[in-house]
Image (cartoon, rainbow, N blue to C red):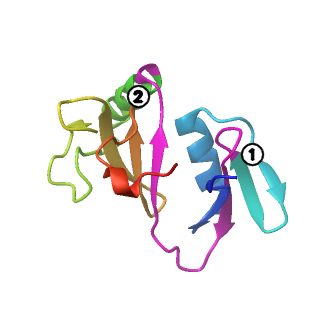
């Protein structure tokens, strides 16, 4: 069996607010509670478990979406003033970046509930051949 990421624990200051925000942003199915966690399923393979933490540890989470979803996210951010940038350090505010050399795919970065989030429309293709799985 190939290695795959099954779930992640996402520490946040306000578990319920964070999970509601992620569900709305990514248009996910309803979350469920499992004791300590409030969880959402991203696809058939990956679950995010949101947990309240005294001091959230920042994570980088990247969400692969289709072009229409990306456009809805960007339109929403432009309308409500949510800041985003084309690059992780934030040097290109209000811009959309390219995922791969040559312009395939779009991406934007934002801060959400203490974490750096990336929304992108294509998988990265610049992984060296020796580093690719299978």
42 in the magenta segment: yes
Give the class, few, some or many, for how many residues have Cα within 10 Å of label 1's Cα (few <14, many ≥20). some
Q: Percent position (x, y) of residue 131?
A: 39, 57
Quadrant of the rendered image containing residue 120: top left
Q: Is residue 85 left or right of residue 45?
A: left
Query: Could you tell me which secondary element the residue under label 2 belongs to?
Result: helix
Q: Compared to 14, does 54 lie above or below?
A: below
Of residues 3 and 29, which is closer to you in this image? 3
Q: Percent position (x, y) of residue 63?
A: 48, 43
The span shown in magenta is 41-68
Q: Percent position (x, y) of residue 82?
A: 35, 42
Q: Are marks 1 and 2 in contact (CB under 8 Å)?
A: no
Q: Residue at x 82, y 55 (%)?
A: 33
User: Outermost residue, bottom direction?
Assistant: 54
Q: Percent position (x, y) of residue 15?
A: 65, 61
Q: Compared to 54, does 23 lie above or below?
A: above
Query: Could you tell me which secondary element the residue under label 1 belongs to?
Result: loop
Q: Compared to 76, does 91 lie above or below?
A: below
* Label 1 sits on residue: 31
* Label 2 sits on residue: 70
Give the class, few, some or many, for how many residues have Cα within 10 Å of label 2's Cα (few <14, many ≥20). many
So how many labels did they put on this image? 2
Of residues 87 and 23, which is closer to you in this image? 87
Dot 1 or dot 2, earlier in sequence: 1
Q: Residue at x 45, y 69 (%)?
A: 58
């Amino acid at each position: 069996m190939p290695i795959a990421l099954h779930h992640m624990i996402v520490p946040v200051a306000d578990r319920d607010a964070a999970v509601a925000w992620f569900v709305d942003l990514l248009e996910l199915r309803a979350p469920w509670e499992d004791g300590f966690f409030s969880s959402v399923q991203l696809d058939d393979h990956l679950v995010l478990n949101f947990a309240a933490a005294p001091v959230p540890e920042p994570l980088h989470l990247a969400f692969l979406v289709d072009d229409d979803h990306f456009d809805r996210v960007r339109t929403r951010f432009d309308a409500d003033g949510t800041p985003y940038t084309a690059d992780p350090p934030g040097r290109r505010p209000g811009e959309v970046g390219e995922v791969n050399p040559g312009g395939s795919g779009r991406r934007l970065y934002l801060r959400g509930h203490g974490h750096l989030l990336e929304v992108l429309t294509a998988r990265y293709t610049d992984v060296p051949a020796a580093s690719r799985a299978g």
